[in-house]
């Protein structure tokens, strides 16, 4: 097994362990993050109904038009602020943060800090 496969399996194992404890409810939905080598996706999910309430990504054309020239960490910060703004439009202020098995470092931390600064509570 190569190193990339081991890292992926380790992340999936960590994510499953986290998801045993982290569940989104109607009152406090789950803010989950997915990170690739180049982009990030974020969505707010109500696990009780199984519906995604808010979703956005750095791959969207509008986001790339405004923030495409920034580095990945800065794009993550902008994405965190954007998710918080979209959540406020839907009257979502409190969420449970699901880091998806990724370490709370770098882009994931920048995303979470920007979302907190924009008014989200988690």
Image (tube, rainbow, N blue to C red):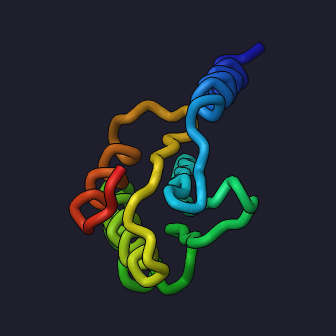
Do we see residue 4 in this rendering? no
Question: What is the x, y in percent for residue 62?
Answer: 49, 86
Q: Residue extending furthest top?
A: 1
Left or right of 104 on screen, residue 49: right
When the figure is inspected, residue 60 is found, relative to residue 104, above or below; the finding is below
Question: What is the x, y in percent for residue 40?
Answer: 52, 57
Q: Residue 49 lies in what quarter of the image?
A: bottom right
Left or right of 110 on screen, residue 36: right
- 119, 7: nearer the viewer: 119
Residue sitting at x 26%, y 66%? 119
Q: Residue extending furthest left?
A: 117
Residue sitting at x 54%, y 57%? 29
Do we see residue 32 in this rendering? yes
Left or right of 74 on screen, residue 68: right
Q: Residue 11 lies in what quarter of the image?
A: top right
Left or right of 91 on screen, residue 101: right
Q: Residue 44 lies in what quarter of the image?
A: bottom right
Picture quarter with the N terminus:
top right
Residue sitting at x 64%, y 60%? 46
- The total of numbered circles placed on residues is 0
Question: What is the x, y in percent for residue 77?
Answer: 31, 61
- 73, 47: nearer the viewer: 47
- 24, 31: nearer the viewer: 24
When the figure is inspected, residue 73 is found, relative to residue 109, above or below; the finding is below
Residue sitting at x 34%, y 36%? 105
When the figure is inspected, residue 3 is found, relative to residue 69, above or below; the finding is above
């Amino acid at each position: 097994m190569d190193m990339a496969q081991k890292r992926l399996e380790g992340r999936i194992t960590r994510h499953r362990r986290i998801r045993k404890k982290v569940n989104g409810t109607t009152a406090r939905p789950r803010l989950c993050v997915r990170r690739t080598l180049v982009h990030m996706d974020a969505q707010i999910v109500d696990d009780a109904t199984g519906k995604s309430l808010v979703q956005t990504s750095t791959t969207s054309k509008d986001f790339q038009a405004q923030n495409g020239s920034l580095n990945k960490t800065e794009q993550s910060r902008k994405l965190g602020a954007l998710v918080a703004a979209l959540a406020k439009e839907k009257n979502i202020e409190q969420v449970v943060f699901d880091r998806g098995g990724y370490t709370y470092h770098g882009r994931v931390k920048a995303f979470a800090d920007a979302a907190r600064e924009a008014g989200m509570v988690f």
